[in-house]
Structures are given as structure tokens and as C-alpha cells.
Amino acid sequence: MTNRHDKLIADAAKKILAPLGFRRKGRSRVWLLDHGWWLTVVEFQPSGWAKGSGLNVAAHWLWIEQEHLSFDYFRRSEPFIEYTSDAQFEPEATRLADSAAHEANRLDQTFISIEAAATVLAMEERGLPEQAQGSWAAYDAGMAMALSGRTDDATALFNSVRDERVRPAVARVEKLLSDPVEFRREADNLIAVHRKVVGLVPRQ
């Protein structure tokens, strides 16, 4: 039987997020808004210790070879709210869904184009502490720069990657930077494969 708090969360998300284009991922607490090359990810975060929910909202880039969703550009969370009764939790579930919708709109406005994403992600990478630079954020910024036609910036970002976990992803695409058509074809392939892995319909 579905727990009451799970049903209240699902009902609030269906009422507030579904009209914006979000779709629930299976029977999970994750709702996705599909932008083609990226997703808005809303997670009504559960706890292993209590009934209730927190909230995480982030952008997830699809130009990567992996089998899971990740919070690639994370800016908003809400603390865990414990369920004590329907009367207490129903307005909290609505508030969390409203907060998710507000943040989703902000992400839509931030990443209105691949060019905008390139600028924002490059600034994000430069703003990280030095010890945190040169990892996935640099890869994401490099991908956006390359797809925006800013090859020199993409090259610099890919060259800055020193995280060994990220180097294979960089190696797959950086050799194609001199050929924008081939680079875009490879990016489209990465996106298509990842979309299938996470259960999205093919791009039109």
C-alpha cells in the first residue's frame, strides 16, 4: 500500500509540476522536465529514518556516458519535513512542489540556449575552489562551449581536466574539436544513448 506521505507528494507534484511538462520517473519521487540536451531534475528526497520529504532541484546534462541521473548544476534544496499527519503534511508537500516549480523556471531562464549554458558553466567552473576545478564541471562547460562554436574555450576547458575519472569522457570528444560537424554528431550520439538509458523518449 502506498504510504500517505508518498501519495500527498505525488498528488502535489502532479498538480503543480505536471502542467509545466514534468513527468514522473516510474514510481519514484523524481520528476523530470525534458529539454532535449538537458533535464530539470526534481527529487522529493526521502529519508531512511522518517516519513516525509526534502527537496532537491538541479540541471542534468545528457552529453555523458553514464547510467544514472546526477545533479550537475545544483542550486536549490529544502530541508526535510517530517510527516506527522495528512493535515500537517499536505500543505508542506504543496509548498515543496511550488518551490520546485519556481526553481525549475529559474533554470529554464538560466539555460535558455546552449550559448547561455556555455557562459554560465564556464563561470561556474572558474568560481570553484582551485582544488575542485578540472573535474566534471570543466567537462560540461567544455561540451557547451564546443557546441556553441567556441572551440578555443572548449579546448582550454578540456585541457584543464585533471580528474582521472573524467579524462576518458574528455578523450572521447576532444579529438573531434577540429571538426564541428563530427563533434556535434558525437554529442548527439552521447545524448541519444543516455536518454535511452534513463528512460526518455528519443529526440524528434
Image (tube, rainbow, N blue to C red):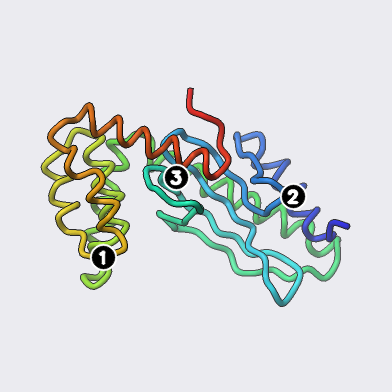
Task: Choose the circle earlier in sequence order: 2 or 3.
Answer: 2
Residue that mark 2 sits on: 10
Q: Eyeballing the image, is 160 above or below 22?
A: below
Q: Nearer the viewer, mark 1 or mark 2?
A: 1
Q: Which residue is drawn at 81% across and 64% down?
A: 88
In this view, the residue farthest toward the right is: 1
Disc 1 residue type (three-letter): Asp
Task: Choose the circle earlier in sequence order: 1 or 2.
Answer: 2
In this view, the residue farthest toward the top is: 204
Residue that mark 3 sits on: 107
Label 1, label 3: how far apart the Cα atoms are: 27 Å
**Labelled disc at residue 163:** 1
SS at mark 3 in the image:
helix
Quadrant hosting residue 134:
bottom left
Q: Residue at x 41, y 55 (%)?
A: 72
Q: Pointer 2: residues within 10 angstroms few (<14), some, or many (20+)? A: many
Quadrant showing the N terminus = bottom right
Q: Of residues 183 and 21, which is closer to you in this image?
A: 183
SS at mark 2 in the image:
helix
SS at mark 1 in the image:
loop
Q: Eyeballing the image, is 99 above or below 150?
A: below
Q: Which residue is drawn at 67% across and 55% down?
A: 95
Label 2, label 3: how far apart the Cα atoms are: 22 Å
**Cβ atoms under marks 1 and 3 closer than 8 Å:** no
